[in-house]
Amino acid sequence: MVLRAQGLLGAQGRRGGVPGMLRQLGAVQLDTISVLARSHELVAYARLGPVGRAKVEQAYWHPRAPAAFEYWSHAACVLPAEEWPYYAFRRRAFVVKGVRWHQSHPDVCERVLARIRAEGPLTATELGGAKKGGPWWDWSDTKIAVEWLLDTGEVICARRVGWRRVYDLPERVLPAELAGAEPGAAECVTRLAEVAGRALGVVTQADLSDYQRLNYAGAELRSGGTGLTAAAAAEAAGLVPVEIAAGRRGRAVPAWAHPAAVDSDPGGQPRRGRHRTTLLSPFDSLIWDRKRTLRVFGFEHSLEAYVPQHKRVHGYFTMPLLAGGQLIGRVDPARDGRTLIARKLTLDKPSAAEPMAAALAEAASWVGCDSVRVERAEPSHLVPRLQSALTGLGV
């Protein structure tokens, strides 16, 4: 159910291309790290196969017909344009709180907003610069102001140029019925609960909260008198109460399933389909919740990019291997010219060698590499089997 809901099992996940994938997942996380590609590109690749990277970018950030915007969901995410109204509760919560990381200045905010109104969409650089000249977090007053305007919804980011946000007015980017909508907090949370259920297939209370950080709903939900618990949100969203087996003893845990996930054939068996064999970004929504990943797949995974190099166990940007519906290995990739390098590679079972070779070969081709070099692999006795599989694939 989870794999099908995430677009990694069967043909349904490939219908509609990148926009269809984005609507199904509800959120695709962004991150600055780029190894093989940036994470939002890797998420599309994992589901759709080697679709051109430029095509992926244009689908997210189409200059003439924006289909997405960027905002705070699970983290900084690309979100379907039609979801704009349902983040109104979060935008209002920012206004109530009055501050995020930096203290903004009303006069600077007004000047920035006036320029965007008069001149059209602008980047932070075009507005006067993003930094004061120091470290990356040493934002200029202009950058602080425009990010606050983004938080509160007075501006929107529906396009990036390179890795730079382009800020514009919501009413210039979105249809009037979306830009002007202001649903209440309960309606927003109910909608996001439905999106989480649809994207994950089956959810516990913790899953429901984590997918779009509903536990960080903000002042409006705490003081607005909605009384909307996770169970009430799930019920309002039309999710179906179920029980799942969890823990070593397989004890029954209450959960909810999306109606589409429990669709089965007349014999009562879940629908079948072809599994994707692919490498996953560590920020992929299938695995971004580490506790859920362990519970569902029995697979421990963590991002070690911000861990000192000498303390890393698996590598800088470790990508899990998904094959046959299981997570059965991982690799820390890099590139050197037209060679994809597996700096460290781990196989959890002997039969993972061939799927890992296939995943490396496809990923190499997708990013314009024509060879694969394995620097270190564990367990070492599987290296000949892995190399033989790579040779057979022509890499």
Image: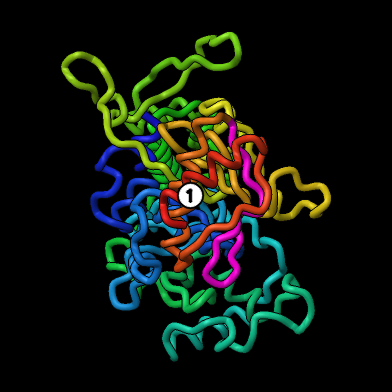
- Residue at 52% x, 33% y is 207
Q: Tell me residue 358's x, y (percent).
A: 43, 47
Q: Secondary structure at mark 1?
A: helix
* Vertical relation: 202 (above or below) 278: above
- Residue at 71% x, 49% y is 304
Of helix, strand and loop, which mostly describes the magenta segment? Answer: strand
Report the front residue among 104 and 157.
157
- Tag 1: amino acid: Leu
> Magenta includes 196?
no
* Side of 287 where 80 appears, left or right: left
- Residue at 59% x, 86% y is 125
Q: Tell me residue 28's x, y (percent).
A: 46, 53
* Vertical relation: 331 (above or below) 337: above
Report the front residue among 178 and 338.
338
Quarter holding the N terminus?
Answer: top left
> Magenta includes 343?
yes
- State whether residue 182 appears in this view: no
Q: Which residues are magenta?
A: 334-348
* Side of 183 where 372 appears, left or right: right
Colour setting: rainbow
Q: Quadrant of residue 240?
A: top left
* Side of 252 where 129 appears, left or right: right
Residue at numbered disc 1: 390
